[in-house]
Amino acid sequence: MSKERIIRTTILVAGIYFIVEFLIKGISSGVDNGFFKKVTPVFTDVLIVIGLFAIGIGLVNIFMLHSHRIIRFRPNWEHSIVLFVGFFTVMTFAVLKWTGPQPPPGQPHVGAGNLFDYVVTKILVHMNSTIYSFLAFFVTSAALRAFRVRGLESAVMMVSAVIVLSAMAPETSFPFLAQFREWMDAKINTAVFRALTFGMILGGITVAMRMWLGIERGAMFEAT
Amino acid sequence: MSCVIGQVSADRVIEWVLGQPLWLRWLGSAGIIFLLSLLVSVVIAALGRESRKPGALCLSVGVATAVALVGWSVATRSGSMAVHQLFGGALAVIVRAVLVSNRLEVLDWIAPRVDRLSYRIVYVGLAMLLALPFIVGHWESKPRPRAITRGLYDAIEECGRTGKPVFLLNAWIMDSRGENQPQFEVIVDHLMRQRVKFVMLSFSPDTTLVGRSLCQKIERYYKDRYGEDYIQYGRDWLEIGYRPIYQTNGWLAWVPNMKTKGIVGAFTTDYMGVDLWKYPIMARPQAALEEERAKEAAEGKEAPKEAGSPSGTESDGGAGSEQGTGASDAGSTDGAAEGGVSEGETVDTSKYLQLGDFGLILEVHYVGTVEQLIGLIRLDNELRGPDGKPKIKVGLGTVNMVVNQMLPYYDSGDLSGILAGVQGAVEYSELLQDEYGEGPSREGVRQRANPYSMGVLFVLSVIILGNLSTLWQKISERREARGAD
């Protein structure tokens, strides 16, 4: 039996199991005599283990990629060194925290054990926030250059954007604007997104069915 | 004496101004800036320059706006008035541009310059506006709470009344900190203020520590205010900690795990490595036990036992000693053991909190996995009440971008409430303030709300300005084409 066939069969069997479990639960929880209640935790544990493998694979991949870059002096090899330095530094701090003397419950670590918390709360947290906050500048420059009325549809979109933006800031949130915005959210927005969600879910079910039955082209083994 | 009278009069004037409706403050600001700009124009004319030239006009309005902005901000110590001056300045430019005899020349001068505005000026302007609240001081924003915010507030209040705990999913990341952190703060503030029991599970490594420190900070605030016994870790709240495995498996592997093994079997220890079953909060609520007894009696089965107290004393609702912090003594190993929870100890996990015992699952997330969560809850017989409706409510705190796609779930009743970005946090904070007064989360929310609204207003302004300049240029082109004909 080829590897491809084994994988397809496993997917098919797993899909059948979960569909039957779902249907049985929907009919009555007692019909199966507790069979699914005993077996499902095993599957979820398997899922958890597979997830752990994914973390490991990701790490190995990153190491391979960046070490090749350093060894062969590819462009930006200096950044790869920074990556490794940062990675092993934080790992060292984490190990120091785990293996060092543990403080009483609820008390912070002291000395070397506190380095990990320091790096996370004082450096990483703020670096992440800073990177994400650049979006504000991108959105603003896009708003100045690109958000122009070019026709009827864009005019409708622009008017509703102005109303919603005005209602979002308390300094410009007149009562009638806020009420109109709530009405737009509750009636128009909800209806549109409900329709979109239906479409997306139906499409998702179709693709999932095809992948389950192994008939989706390019899903696993074939080139698209 | 005259200084004191002057100060008192000035305070009264400022109080009167701040109490006026929004539209009146805008108009008033525009009027004052208009008059000031006329004064500046007179000065420019007195210096021998042409005051009606477009550049001089804009300069006069700009100087007047700056003076008004600084003056009002210093006088009122309120950034809110600073915002009104900016809008007043914009109105004043328009009014002066319309009133001057060479208005077409003025508008022809302004429009292409707005279109060609350098990105650097835009970025500097945005940075200054975002920094404004930190310079002039933060001010109170009083938005009207929306129905989606109130729905979540009422759901937590109901958990407080029924005694059912809340399962708080701390799934946000540092990238969404600006919007999710104030939401997290106001939710935890409400839970601790009302002493609604909650169990927190974290999905993100960086926000695990931040979330924990926020909870501990709020806990300390209420302990200092109401006494050490007011709220205690292990009795009133608990943190399971960071579980990366769930993050890599579509976020929801914890649901079937908790359903089959209960919280004690699924997670086994808290973030400090202490067995979960040792904490009093793990005891099943009285309402859940009575509900199960009624159900078992209706089916003719034996009533479920309460979880034994590890120290031998029975407390209301089941397991746990009277000690609130940390673990109680090791004990109870009776009954059929399911799910080994720690080496050498087996505990009947069915005696401790189950998924169905929670009154609300509340997720603070940058995206939101509530769609799958709602599906799992809705379609599970054991998680539905006798009326067919789900026993557990679901709430969500998420970023503004995602709120729209969650609204259908709120509309259908699957979601009890949604906190929409920073604005949702501010609205929630208003509800808390109106009901219970000032709290520890208020300051953090205010610090984020003001720059947020400044950013929103700046984006709104550039959208309007950009479109007005495009419109005016089109009008000018048509005018020139007609003139050429």
Image: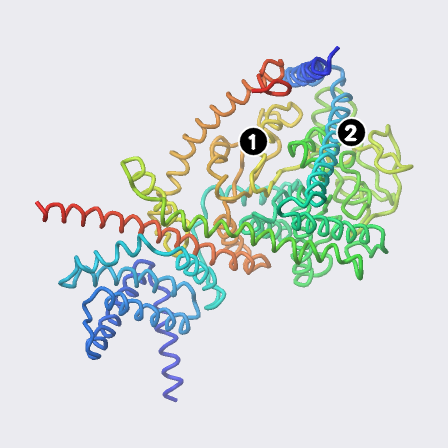
Q: Which mark is residue B371?
A: 1
Task: Rate crowding at label 1 as few (under 14), some (14 to 19) or many (20 or more) other CA atoms within 10 Å.
Answer: few
- Tell me where residue B53 sits by quadrant: bottom left
Is residue B289 something one can see in this rendering?
no
Q: Secondary structure at mark 1?
A: helix
**CA distance for labels 1 and 2:** 32 Å
Chain letter of disc 2 in the image: B
In the rendered image, residues at marks 1 and 2 fall on the same chain: yes
Give coordinates of residue B409: x percent, y percent. 50, 32
Q: Label 2: which residue?
A: B304
Q: In the image shown, does B88 or A65 lie closer to the viewer? A: A65
Q: Is residue A191 above or below residue A1?
A: below
Q: Quadrant of the N terminus of chain A?
A: top right
Give coordinates of residue B392: x percent, y percent. 62, 33
Q: Amino acid at mark 2?
A: Pro
Q: Amino acid at mark 1?
A: Glu
Residue at (32% x, 68% y) in the render = B65
Q: Quadrant of the C terminus of chain A?
A: top right
Please identify the residue farthest to the front as the structure is shown: A72
Please identify the residue farthest to the left as the structure is shown: B485
Chain letter of disc 1 in the image: B
